[in-house]
Amino acid sequence: MLSFFKLIRYHNLLMLAFMQLLFRYAFLKWQDVPLSLADWQYALLVLSTVLIAAGGYVINDIFDQDTDSENKPNRVIVGNNISEAAAYNIYVILNVIGVGIGFYLSNVIQKPGFATIFILIASMLYLYATSLKQTLLIGNLIVALLLSFSVVIIGIYDLYPATYEGNQKQMAVLFSILLDYAIFAFIINFIREIVKDLEDVNGDYNQGMNTLPIVLGVQRTTRVVFVLSFIPLLILLYYTNEYFAVSHLYLTMVYTLLFVVGPLLYFNIKCWSAKSKKDYRHLSTILKFVLLFGILSIAVVAYNIKNHA
């Protein structure tokens, strides 16, 4: 059972579920707007997202057995603790249930065509694991996009179907906030994927992969990451000044500067001198915390708005 939980990256899935629950119960529920899904139906949306993501981890491990044997020899599950045949069965079951729930929810909101979203996500994860991962930057972009879409899908299923002429303006504002967080998640995760490629460069090279560190070299790619890391930093500073300061949301300002901008500045400093596998693993962990604290800020924003008003 422990091997199964390690196979599906349960800690990443818990973070994904926590993120989606946070956006609804620490933000959307605090707004005076109708939501399309009942609580138990929203729980199904979270479950569907988690199951499809879990399936993505499984199929990725199936096709990454040789690479993982070099990069993470102590953490190889498929072929050691779980057979390849059993892993394929787990992958199919996770996706069938996940996509099936997606079909049900699409009919609940009377948008049956939206079910294709779940099929597309599952398909993209399969293509990523089987071929696109080896294509320069495309794999990084897909992983980052899929994470950000797990935020957008909340608006698609919970806000959009409950939108009518009378609340269209308010719903558009809420959807735009979700979109801002989705963009933030995309940028941070895209940078993190490149950092992970830096960490795994030796094993990826031996397996004929075509990642950015292999094409440009480790040092040049580290400099690219250093430059890219200023993008979210500048966006956050602009956002803090233009929205939080103007709206007098000082608690949110302090939180953002201390827990999101601060760690990003630390990432910049450490990135410049990073050279070893251990350094890149540390950088990856920092970005994970930046993403977590960035997502947590939605609760601070909601609390600050309510108490400021």
Image: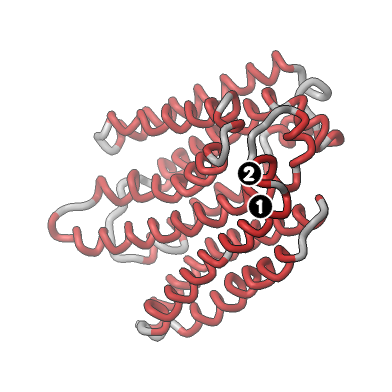
- Could you tell me if the residues under marks 2 and 1 are in contact, i.e. CB atoms within 8 Å? yes
Which amino acid type corresponds to the residue marked 2 in the rendered image? Leu
Rendered residue at 44%/56% (across/down): 183
Rendered residue at 40%/31% (across/down): 102
| Residue that numbered label 2 is attached to | 212
Left or right placement of residue 298 versus residue 273 in this view: left
| Residue that numbered label 1 is attached to | 221
Q: Quadrant of the N terminus?
A: top right
Q: Is residue 218 visible?
A: yes
Q: Is residue 1 visible?
A: no
Q: Residue 79 occupies which quadrant of the picture?
A: top right
Label 2: state its secondary structure. helix
Q: Looking at the image, which residue sits at the far top?
A: 85
Dot 2: within a 10 Å radius of its alpha carbon, few (fewer than 14), some, or many (20 or more) residues? many
Q: Quadrant of the C terminus?
A: bottom left
Residue 25, compared with residue 268, is above or below; it is above
Residue 199, compared with residue 44, is above or below; it is below
